[in-house]
């Protein structure tokens, strides 16, 4: 399966714990995006990364949230000291480096985070 | 401020008929539009896109129309099939805005046999 991989698919954390969500982009893709979908809402952009570089983090909450995309390995979205309001589906998407005038992003299956 | 609006939360269509899903946007800087389909517990799947230099793009049963003056686009599915039942999201991109997609809230399409 050469698609975008996310793990875990489901994650349960108690309030105050840390959540780590992983995303492996499609082969050949070097751009990664994280989105969050709260219940009854659409997808909201969080952050856009390239290898070792955060390009746009305008959608990230100012505190407790961080993201990285290291030279080797998957992209990680980290949420520290989780609260109930962090419960949501978190989707990762990737796109290729070369811009051929199209902007399609390809999505993983998502990680459903539940904070108890 | 919802820059991409899908005003119909749901739509029900008979199998074989046309499904028309609508999307309006407010930001005149958007220059690329995409439609995604999403099944429960899965990630969105890319369907079709259109650049602002075009007014129509067709791919099999799916056609997207863009009316820039009205800031409106629509997705036509002909003929509709039960497997098309899903939530459809409209998304827009401003090429100068680091490629992040701005999403509508989605329209849930039910195609009845």
Image: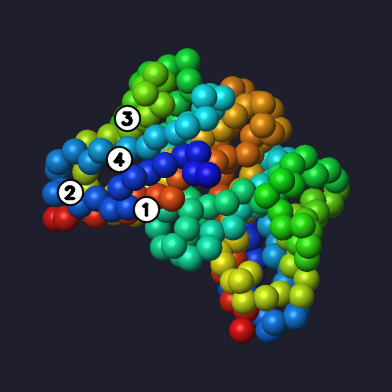
Gap in angstroms between the C-alphas marked 4 and 1: 10 Å
Q: Is mark 4 on a helix, strand or loop?
A: strand
Instruction: Kindly identify the residue that appears in the image at 41 percent across and 20 percent down.
Output: B68
Lower sequence index among marks 4 and 1: 4
Residues under numbered marks 3 and 2 in contact, where contact means CB atoms less than 8 Å apart? no
Gap in angstroms between the C-alphas marked 1 and 2: 14 Å
Q: Mark 1 points at which residue?
A: B87
| A6 lies above or below B61 | below
Q: Which of B109 and A74 is in front in this view?
A: B109
Lower sequence index among marks 4 and 3: 4
Lower sequence index among marks 1 and 2: 2
The colour scheme of the drawn protein is rainbow
- The lab-note entry on whether marks 4 and 3 share a chain reads yes
Q: Name the residue under label 4.
A: B21
Q: Where is residue B26 in the image (x, y as percent from the top left)?
A: 47, 32
Q: Name the residue under label 3.
A: B63
**Circle nearer the viewer, 1 or 3:** 1
- Quadrant of the image occupied by residue B20: top left
Gap in angstroms between the C-alphas marked 3 and 2: 17 Å
Q: Position of residue B109 (x, y in %)?
A: 28, 51
- Categorize mark 2 by other alpha carbons within 10 Å: few (<14), some (14-19), many (20+): some
Gap in angstroms between the C-alphas marked 1 and 3: 17 Å
Gap in angstroms between the C-alphas marked 4 and 3: 11 Å
Chain bearing tag 4 is B
- Quadrant of the image occupied by residue A90: bottom right
Task: Check residue B13 in the rendering and tell me which mark sits there, or answer none.
Answer: 2
């Amino acid at each position: 399966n050469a698609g975008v991989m996310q793990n875990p698919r489901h994650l349960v954390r108690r309030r105050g714990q840390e959540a780590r969500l992983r995303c492996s982009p499609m082969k050949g893709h070097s751009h990664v995006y994280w989105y969050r979908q709260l219940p009854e809402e659409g997808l909201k952009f969080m952050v856009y990364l390239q290898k070792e570089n955060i390009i746009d983090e305008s959608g990230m909450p100012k505190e407790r949230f961080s993201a990285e995309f290291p030279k080797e390995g998957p992209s990680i979205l980290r949420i520290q000291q989780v609260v109930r309001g962090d419960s949501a589906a978190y989707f990762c998407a990737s796109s290729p480096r070369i811009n051929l005038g199209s902007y399609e992003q390809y999505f993983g299956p998502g990680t459903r985070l539940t904070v108890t | 401020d919802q820059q991409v609006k899908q005003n119909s939360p749901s739509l029900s269509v008979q199998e074989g008929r046309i499904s028309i899903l609508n999307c309006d946007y407010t930001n005149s800087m958007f220059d690329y539009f995409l439609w995604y389909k999403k099944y429960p517990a899965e990630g969105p799947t890319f369907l079709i896109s259109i650049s602002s230099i075009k007014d129509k793009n067709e791919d099999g049963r799916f056609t997207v129309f863009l009316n820039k003056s009205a800031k409106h686009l629509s997705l036509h599915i002909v003929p509709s099939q039960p497997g098309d039942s899903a939530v459809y999201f409209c998304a827009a991109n401003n090429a100068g805005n680091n490629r992040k997609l701005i999403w509508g809230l989605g329209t849930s399409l039910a195609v009845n046999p």
